[in-house]
């Protein structure tokens, strides 16, 4: 838990002695609260834009292991801290009061502001303290965290829209027993990064495909994807599915998480469709964790709205615990012929979280012609198939075993060879001889055949 200093750990006042020395007023109860967090095994830190000896001495007295002063980009520092400790941003709580805290507050799992935080901050955070900065706000949050930990509970926000006397909204914060921490502990994001990006030629090449390019923003698409998924799970649980030709370039681009990803590359011996790649990763995950849940995401997607995405992951993970194979649908905005389509059965709701609902799949449609695509858009009851999925690794392997047995036997033998150090030629010999027949098996085939277990929810 990294709080800010001025306005959070202190009252933001400027105090000077007769000799001109600067002073800061810290609250002793906040300090004791930080020590209680440490005793409970929770990592503490200070992240501040200021750079003073007073703050350094305070951090030293409280034995705070992570002190970061003079920080302009707080979110980057918090990301780096989380990665070092094997945590996701969802496992980080941050308390801030000013505009330079806003980006970090929006990204972490739990955000809070003192009672006297700026209006923009108060409107953005999950919880507004009853105490002001330097007057016990930090202790207030700490006690809630410790109370939740003692009850083996997850902190959840009940946005009941209670309005304070000053007209600002106060989000009531409660604790509830649960499942989401358990879900996170078994959730493994799987980044599918083996494509050559032929539709983006000539910028995209086989050895430098679209996911390795800067298409929008300062980072490449695979770097953006990595940041997106570590909000749901620790970096050392992220799996990269790719091929030998691209693996080194991807390692370079994801060097920020080099240590976490060292053993998490699963290399296809030969590029095929999505089902073989997913099955290989699923086999490895079941070996590591029989309860593993896969969040499958393409490396080359641009996703706007992290919180909406996180909410979709949360609901989908809940459905996946019931052995549903969940796919994320995108509401069409044009008659696109390059995507597959999904028709949900809206008469049945598998699960609900806020305004987000999951429905059984009524129909899968492969890439349609222009007339059909226009018809689906006009009907308003079809989604684009995003290629993003959540399911238990054991569940998808079961579907592949039942409906694509030739594929399953080949992948199972490849997995055995990989574990015993077999060579690439041996891997290839395990693949079916008829390449055309093998290539037609995308993961959608296994899901469509097992439609009784398929669910869809819209992420936009």
Image (cartoon, helix red, strand yellow):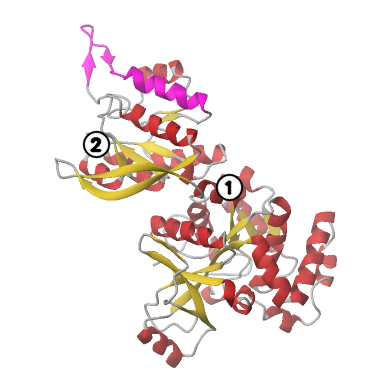
Residue 4, numbered label: none
As measured in the structure, the alpha-carbon distance from the residue carrying label 2 to the one carrying label 1 is: 33 Å
Please, what secondary structure does the residue beneath circle 2 have? loop
Q: Is residue 100 left or right of residue 60?
A: left
Residue at 46% over, 46% down: 90
Residue 394 or residue 34, whichever sits in front: 394
Q: Position of residue 6 (x, y in %)?
A: 29, 27
Closer to the camera: disc 2 or disc 1? 1
Is residue 75 positioned above or below 20 on the image?
A: below
Q: Position of residue 24 (x, y in %)?
A: 28, 18
Q: Is residue 47 left or right of residue 419?
A: left
Residue at 22% over, 46% down: 162
Is residue 241 positioned above or below 174 on the image?
A: below
Quadrant of the snapshot with the C terminus: bottom left
Q: The magenta stretch spans which residues?
A: 14-40
Residue 109 or residue 202, whichever sits in front: 109
Residue 1 seen: no
Residue 406 position by quadrant: bottom right
Residue at 79% over, 71% down: 410
Q: Which residue is mark 2?
A: 117
Q: Which residue is mark 1?
A: 185
Q: Position of residue 101 (x, y in %)?
A: 33, 40
Please, what secondary structure does the residue beneath circle 1 have? helix
Q: Is residue 83 left or right of residue 119?
A: right
Residue 269 seen: yes
Asked whether residue 407 is drawn in magenta, I would say: no
């Amino acid at each position: 838990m990294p709080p800010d200093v001025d306005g959070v750990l202190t009252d933001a006042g400027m105090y000077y002695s007769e000799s001109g020395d600067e002073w800061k007023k810290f609250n002793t109860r906040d300090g004791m609260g930080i020590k209680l967090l440490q005793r409970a095994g929770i990592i503490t830190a200070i992240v501040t834009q200021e750079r003073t000896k007073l703050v350094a001495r305070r951090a030293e007295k409280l034995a705070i292991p992570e002190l970061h002063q003079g920080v302009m980009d707080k979110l980057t520092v918090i990301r780096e801290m989380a990665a070092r400790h094997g945590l996701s941003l969802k496992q980080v709580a941050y308390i801030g009061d000013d505009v330079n805290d806003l980006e970090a507050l929006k990204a972490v799992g739990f955000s809070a502001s003192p009672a006297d935080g700026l209006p923009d901050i108060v409107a953005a955070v999950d919880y507004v303290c009853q105490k002001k900065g330097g007057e016990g706000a930090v202790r207030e949050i700490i006690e809630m965290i410790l109370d939740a930990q003692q009850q083996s509970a997850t902190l959840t926000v009940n946005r009941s829209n209670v309005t304070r006397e000053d007209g600002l909204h106060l989000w009531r914060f409660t604790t509830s027993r649960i499942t989401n921490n358990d879900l996170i502990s078994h959730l493994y994001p799987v980044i599918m990064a083996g494509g050559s990006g032929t539709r983006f030629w000539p910028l995209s090449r086989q050895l430098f495909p679209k996911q390795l390019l800067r298409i929008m923003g300062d980072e490449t698409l695979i770097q953006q994807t990595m940041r997106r998924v570590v909000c749901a799970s620790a970096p050392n649980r992220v799996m990269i599915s790719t091929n030998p030709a691209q693996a080194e370039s991807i390692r370079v681009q994801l060097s920020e998480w080099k240590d976490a990803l060292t053993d998490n590359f699963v290399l296809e011996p030969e590029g095929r469709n999505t089902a073989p790649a997913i099955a290989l990763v699923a086999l490895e995950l079941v070996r590591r964790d029989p309860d593993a849940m896969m969040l499958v995401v393409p490396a080359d997607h641009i996703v706007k709205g992290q919180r909406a995405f996180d909410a979709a992951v949360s609901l989908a993970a809940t459905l996946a615990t019931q052995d549903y194979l969940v796919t994320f649908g995108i509401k069409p905005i044009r008659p696109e012929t390059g995507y597959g389509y999904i028709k949900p059965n809206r008469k049945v709701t598998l699960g609900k979280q806020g305004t987000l609902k999951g429905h059984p799949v009524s129909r899968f449609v492969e890439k349609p012609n222009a007339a059909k695509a226009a018809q689906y858009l006009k009907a308003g009851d079809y989604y684009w198939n995003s290629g993003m999925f959540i399911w238990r690794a054991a569940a998808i392997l079961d579907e592949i075993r039942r409906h694509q047995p030739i594929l399953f036997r080949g992948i199972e033998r490849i997995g055995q060879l990989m574990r015993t150090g077999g060579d690439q030629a041996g891997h290839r010999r395990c693949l079916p001889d008829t390449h055309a027949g093998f290539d037609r098996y995308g993961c959608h085939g296994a899901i469509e055949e097992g439609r009784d277990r398929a669910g869809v929810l819209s992420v936009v």
